Image (cartoon, rainbow, N blue to C red):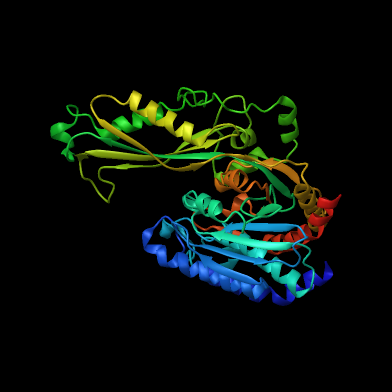
């Protein structure tokens, strides 16, 4: 480990500048005007992979954004690790809430501040630098493949087909992913579960144009009012989702497992303080950690209609819209849930308006076994670098493609994340601790040393 630390110390400034070059590319997958940027990012990653020591790397087309693939096969008889990550990022708006430009990375207080600093450019780049260290120091113990996609933030709509078309190329013993987080900077953890996702959009139409709210208010149904009423009815006063059939397939976690999960450190007062809230909320009968780990949820992600500019414009809007996400737990099927949501919204819509519902994207949840060789190797790696065994946790987030990998490629994934809640991914002032970036590289290198041994044990 001394040689590794020395190499990192000697090259840290270069590591960061190379990462910053990627971050400066505004690869926002949800906006068509950034299509060219997706290819710029893919080419940049290709160059970084080749420089790090892969034998080959190429930018491959999908039916959507490109995928950068690369590999280094040192011996076909050795195990193969497939590294998955994503080059796309969330939109940076609202820009005015950033303390520095989102695509001009800046280091402050030991943190990298930029869109993608953590999710997932910073975390993905750790794997590229770990590869460089292992090739330069002649430490590589496995074959390595990389698949870095450009559509994760919009649900990876085209990656399933890409995987189906390239099954042979993507053959591996484990898929290694860093797109999750740690419980705390000094408490390592391995994410063993991800929630699934169903992401919906509702359009409510009333009159055929915006109307004067004085002349028509009280006589014509207001689509914004109607939409708010429908949305408010989706969760009852006990925090339960009211859609019929929503909980039918929910996997109920045993009391024994809930007790094990409760051992993970969690400071409720610090949690509330960090968010500047007085009390937490959610489904009755569950802790805050359980509400985001083992229970489903429903949230309005955006709602709009009518006039929202500066000053007053007294209109009764002709249309109103909302985007709604539902985070799902194991056994809940996102397609089924999307259909249940649509059926329910249409059923409760009054005749005074017309309603359309469409599914935007989604994916299934995922549970990673804690007894597989890759998990044991990850445990040893974290223990070596952090000096303590990692805690298994279930994340409230979703990476829809992870369950698809198992379905299409027949390969399990191990989720070794190094982000923190404070990193504010998807929000203004996203950040990533330099310490975690360095420790992540070290832990990934250690994983490769332990993985072949665990497979053979």
Classify residue 75 by image quadrant: bottom right
State the image coordinates of residue 226 (x, y, percent, origin top left).
Answer: 30, 30
Residue occupying image coordinates x 79% and y 52%: 377
Residue occupying image coordinates x 70% and y 57%: 81
Residue occupying image coordinates x 46% and y 51%: 154
Residue 104 can be seen in this image: no
Residue occupying image coordinates x 65% and y 38%: 268
Classify residue 148 by image quadrant: bottom right
Q: Is residue 346 above or below residue 134?
A: above
Residue 164 can be seen in this image: yes
State the image coordinates of residue 119 (x, y, percent, origin top left).
Answer: 56, 56
- The total of numbered circles placed on residues is 0
State the image coordinates of residue 94 (x, y, percent, origin top left).
Answer: 41, 56
State the image coordinates of residue 453 (x, y, percent, origin top left).
Answer: 84, 55
Quarter of the image with the N terminus is bottom right
Direction left: furthest residue: 215
Residue placed most toward the observer, 326 or 150: 150
Residue placed most toward the observer, 347 or 285: 347
Decide if residue 168 is on the left or right side of residue 161: right
Q: Is residue 305 above or below residue 41?
A: above
Decide if residue 157 is on the left or right side of residue 305: right
């Amino acid at each position: 480990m001394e040689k590794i630390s020395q190499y990192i110390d000697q090259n840290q400034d270069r590591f960061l500048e190379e990462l910053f070059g990627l971050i400066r590319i505004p690869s926002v997958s949800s906006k068509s005007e950034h299509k060219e940027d997706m290819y710029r990012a893919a080419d940049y990653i290709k160059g970084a992979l080749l420089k790090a020591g892969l034998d080959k790397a190429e930018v491959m087309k999908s039916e959507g954004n490109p995928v950068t693939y690369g590999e280094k096969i040192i011996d076909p008889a050795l195990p193969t690790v497939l590294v998955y990550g994503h080059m796309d990022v969330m939109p940076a708006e609202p820009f005015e809430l950033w303390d520095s430009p989102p695509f001009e990375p800046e280091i402050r207080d030991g943190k990298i501040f930029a869109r993608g600093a953590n999710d997932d450019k910073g975390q993905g780049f750790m794997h590229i630098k770990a590869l460089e260290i292992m090739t330069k120091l002649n430490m590589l113990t496995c074959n390595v493949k990389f698949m870095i996609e450009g559509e994760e933030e919009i649900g990876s709509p085209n990656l399933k087909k890409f995987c189906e078309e390239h099954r042979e190329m993507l053959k591996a013993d484990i898929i290694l992913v860093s797109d999750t987080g740690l419980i705390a900077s000094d408490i390592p953890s391995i994410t063993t579960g991800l929630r699934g996702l169903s992401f919906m959009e509702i359009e409510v139409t009333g009159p055929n144009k915006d109307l004067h709210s004085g002349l028509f208010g009280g006589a014509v149904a207001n689509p914004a009012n109607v939409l708010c009423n429908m949305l408010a009815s989706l969760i009852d006063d006990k925090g339960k989702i009211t859609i019929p059939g929503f909980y039918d397939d929910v996997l109920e976690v045993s009391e024994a497992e809930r007790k094990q999960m409760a051992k993970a450190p969690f400071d409720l007062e610090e949690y509330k303080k960090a968010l500047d809230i007085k009390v937490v909320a959610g489904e009755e009968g569950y802790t805050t950690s359980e509400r985001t780990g083992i229970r489903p949820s429903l949230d309005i992600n955006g709602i709009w209609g009518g006039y929202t500019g500066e000053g007053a414009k007294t209109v009764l809007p002709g249309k109103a819209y909302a985007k709604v996400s539902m985070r799902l737990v194991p056994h809940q099927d996102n397609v089924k849930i999307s259909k249940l949501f649509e059926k329910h919204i249409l059923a409760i819509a009054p005749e005074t308006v017309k309603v359309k519902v469409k599914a935007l994207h989604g994916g299934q949840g995922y549970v990673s076994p804690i007894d597989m060789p890759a998990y044991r190797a990850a445990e040893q790696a974290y223990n070596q670098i952090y000096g303590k065994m990692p805690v298994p946790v279930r994340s409230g987030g979703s990476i829809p493609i992870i369950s698809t990998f198992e379905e299409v490629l027949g390969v399990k994934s191990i989720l070794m994340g190094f982000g923190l809640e404070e990193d504010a991914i998807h929000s203004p002032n996203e950040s990533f601790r330099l310490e975690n970036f360095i420790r992540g590289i070290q832990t990934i290198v250690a994983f490769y040393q332990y993985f072949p041994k665990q497979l053979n044990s």
